[in-house]
Amino acid sequence: MDILIATGRLAENTVRKAAGEKTDVLVADIDIAAFLTPKKLIKEFQEANFSKKYDLILIPGLVSGDFSKASEILGCKIRLGPKHAYDLGFVLPFAEKTEFSEKVPACELLLDVRKKLALELIRKTEEEASALLTLRGIKIGGTACMKVMGEIVGAMEMDALTLQVRIEAFIARGADIIDLGATLNTLPEQVRRTVSLAKTFTTTPISIDTLDPELITEGVEAGVDLVLSLNSTNMDIVGPVIARKGTAAVIIPDGEKSLESLVRNIEAARRLGIEKIIADPVLDPMGHNITESIVRYYEFHRMYPQIPVFFGVGNVTELMDVDTIGVNATLSGIGAEAGASILFTPEFSDKAQGSIRELKRASEMMQLSRIRESSPKDLGLDMLCIKEKRRRPSFDIPENAIQARPSKNWSLDPEGPVRIRIVSDSISGNGGLIVAEHEKASVVGRNAREVMDTLLELEVISRLDHAAYLGRELEKAELALHFNRSYAQDDVF
């Protein structure tokens, strides 16, 4: 496939270096490549008098305009390349097997394409996966993807609407199993009511989280799919009803958390007739023998590969003042190697919000890594949030640059102040709305640009410094939504 890349003078060296010798380059008589027009492209192409016929001309991804007429005149397809020249090396290998777009830059298009292919591979693999057990059709263990369990802390004391909203939110974020948490004050009748309600709200598997035998019994009778947790303190009391109902159970060791204790309790569960068993060797927090507990997981899975394993990631993330995204990804990788079938998180504290979504993506990445027998990189899916996979080039400070300094003068805009706040999406936990309130109007939008454009259109801003200030604050509000952070006007982000 013969490809021609059109660019400007400033980007020429970067384009030639990124494109290599496999493509030709047309350097238009302009400095900035994004200013290329259809008319300019036609003129430059015809003057270059190329000896070959091209199948595709890639123009800069930031170019605007309709190049369909130019495509007819030049006799080949004209499509948007990447936004930045240094991404050509990433884009060009896809040129023969991907139809590039006239409207979407190739770098963005390919990210979507690779993501779509990755998710389709996960879906197909999950359909064909063999499982160690199933819960309402959800495959647990075997070659199936690790499933994410989200615990709703204090679920038994919630009113129906709050419970429904929380369940829907967890499922929207990627939870495969909903765990209903009980407290020391939970009453048996609350368990039966909550489990019954939860089952009307979703077909997702429901579990109950308590060691109290009376509460477990009520949950099992109400129809939970899974019980957390059984050990020697409650096994003899609730084991028979769990066996009779065919309910799945997570088995944990006794207080000493030894591997021998876990095996003993599993054998006791089997003697009582419990067939659907999931083992929890117990993941300890950082600073409290986490390494020893990971070894315990590894040894158990090596000894009993046919028993699904419960991996309590939340035990670590909730007890670390560290951003959860990297911790969740790392623990998911460790869990995958240690045979984990279920990744558990309560998403309880503010700092742990987003853990369900993070564990879901991490689980998908580990599944792709297993399928491709590779490290979890270049999969089409990633968890990069702040850091970049490919950095944009930096530039030198111009000569005679003026040192920036804040203005000493400040005046209120005659049109009046604008108050900015955000409304987060409480269901998905990702995104939301920016609200800009003025005495003449309140503007709501999903990004800083559309809110600012509307404020200008309404003519509620009359000073350049006020417009600059609002632009900064609106961008901070948009970033707060993007990163699921709180926002307060004038505070440092």
Image (tube, grey):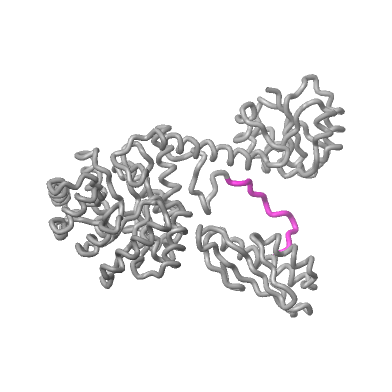
Residue 391 visible at all: yes
Q: Quadrant of the N terminus?
A: top right
Q: Is residue 238 magenta?
A: no
Magenta span: helix, strand or loop, mainly?
Answer: loop
Which quadrant of the figure has residue 408? bottom right
Relative horizontal placement of residue 365, taking residue 458 as reference (left or right): left
Which quadrant of the figure has residue 223? bottom left
Relative horizontal placement of residue 487, taking residue 414 as reference (left or right): left
Residue 286 visible at all: no
**Above or below, 117 relative to 21:** below
**Above or below, 77 relative to 367:** above
Q: Residue furthest top?
A: 51
Q: Position of residue 24 (x, y in %)?
A: 72, 27
Residue at x 64% of width, y 36% of height = 88
Q: Quadrant of the C terminus?
A: bottom right
Q: Which residues are magenta?
A: 391-403
Q: Position of residue 395 (x, y in %)?
A: 66, 49
Q: Position of residue 440 (x, y in %)?
A: 75, 76
Residue at x 69% of width, y 65% of height = 471
Relative horizontal placement of residue 124, taking residue 14 as reference (left or right): left
Q: Position of residue 430 (x, y in %)?
A: 53, 58
Count every numbered label the image shows and give the total.
Answer: 0
Residue at x 29% of width, y 49% of height = 310
Residue at x 56% of width, y 69% of height = 487
Q: Nearer the viewer, residue 204 or 300?
A: 204
Q: Is residue 402 magenta?
A: yes
